[in-house]
Image (cartoon, rainbow, N blue to C red):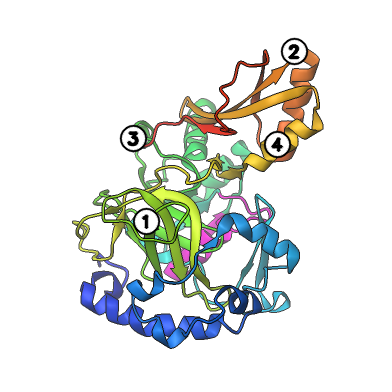
Amino acid sequence: MTDHYDSLETRSPAMRARGEASALPQILVRALKAPGWAKHLAGVNPKAIESRAALATLPVLRKSDLAALQKENPPFGGFNLTPANKAKRLHMSPGALFEPEGHGKDYANAARALFAAGFRTGDIVHNAFSYHLTPGAYMLEEGAFALGCAVIPGGVGNTEQQLDAIAHYKPSGYVGTPDFLKILLDTADKTGKDASSIKRALVSGAALPASLRDELGRRGVQVLQCYATAELGVIAYESSAREGMICNETLIVEIVRPGTGEPVTEGEVGEVVVTSFNADYPMIRLATGDLSAFLPGPSPCGRTNRRIRGWLGRADQTAKVKGMFVHPKQVADVGARHPELKRLRLVVGRDSEQDTMTLIAECDAPATALESAVGDTLQSVTKLKGAVKLVAPGSLPNDGKVIADERPVS
């Protein structure tokens, strides 16, 4: 069995640098045809950007600014090269962000991540990412198609119905969040339905603590993870070596000092900034808001691209809960709908291998009815269920923190 998806994965650093030197001016020339990029990169000579060092001189585009830019210039802020009516699919992600999907094969470059996780031609894959508006399910589905796999479009929820499909089709692979994989297996045990065909999984969108990975492994499923965003596709992925996450060959990853575009030294934690070569929707130095750090040297699996430590938190206070981003503005929106509330803090935690949310709100006159109403508003605004705890004024620290992510980083 071939160990690597293609020869790009085992290039020498010098060969990869030459490839980047050739690709960078080309993608910049194309990107500057889009009005958003022409404005953002005004005055840039694309032919002069022939290295990572030259790339680092360009301004970053903050993902947190995209929503406002898209609202000013719908639908994509002027950063798309393919018009919306020529796209294959039009997606909407949490935080009111919109993304086009092009017609190209494996547009999110997920196939090599699936290959590294053991997926092969002829496999049946159960896809438990959401097929509702957001692009995650389609990213992995297109990658699976590129490998020659068949896909069960499970989506989210309807656990027992999904188990019926699994028992009937007997997929060998699973893609989705790690939390839902555990729910599927737990429910299969309780109901006597057969999910034993699933032997491998590529997960994303939620934390994968070592305890959960080990539990799933004991239950016969070898789990690897990938790191992806709606705008960039799969940024990095694990291999069987499980030593960091290998950067995808179809983009350039930088780690910069948060709040700047300045690359940090190897090993230093900073913000993940990515340049993609997507022909329909290129991204030039998109600052993701995620924190990570480069690991030294190549992976023991033989792949030679740079590796990151994985997701180490947020450069801002945005948190990803059960695969959905929750933004400080959403917490403020909850408070705006309930003037009785004063200072608020959303605490994100982990319980029984699942993400949890608790909104702590200061209030002069706590009441059960208000607590229930605030809980309903929280779910309406974030699309996620969470607990609500009303406390006396002055109980929360005056430190400006709106979202406190207290999940352990693994």
The span picked out in magenta is 129-152
Q: Nearer the viewer, mark 2 or mark 3?
A: 2
Alpha carbons under labels 2 and 3: distance apart: 39 Å
Alpha carbons under labels 3 and 1: distance apart: 16 Å
Q: Is residue 75 left or right of residue 230?
A: right
Label 1, on which residue?
237
Disc on the earlier residue, 3 or 4: 3
Whether tag 2 and tag 3 are in contact, CB under 8 A, the answer is: no
Residue 148 forms part of the magenta stretch: yes
Which image quarter holds the C terminus?
Answer: top left
Label 4, on which residue?
332
Mark 2, Cα crowd under 10 Å, few <14 / some 14-19 / many 20+, is some
Residue 147 forms part of the magenta stretch: yes
Mark 3, Cα crowd under 10 Å, few <14 / some 14-19 / many 20+, is few
Q: Is 409 or 395 nearer to us in this picture?
A: 395
Whether tag 2 and tag 4 are in contact, CB under 8 A, the answer is: no
Give the residue type at disc 2: Pro
Q: Which mark is residue 210?
A: 3
Alpha carbons under labels 2 and 1: distance apart: 46 Å
Label 2, on which residue?
366
Q: Nearer the viewer, mark 2 or mark 1?
A: 2
Q: Is residue 394 left or right of residue 348?
A: right
Compared to residue 169, the image places residue 280 above or below, namely below
Which image quarter holds the N terminus?
Answer: bottom left
Give the residue type at disc 3: Ala
Q: Is 8 or 72 nearer to us in this picture?
A: 72
Please state the horizontal and vertical placement of residue 87, each as a whole percent of the image.
Answer: 66, 75
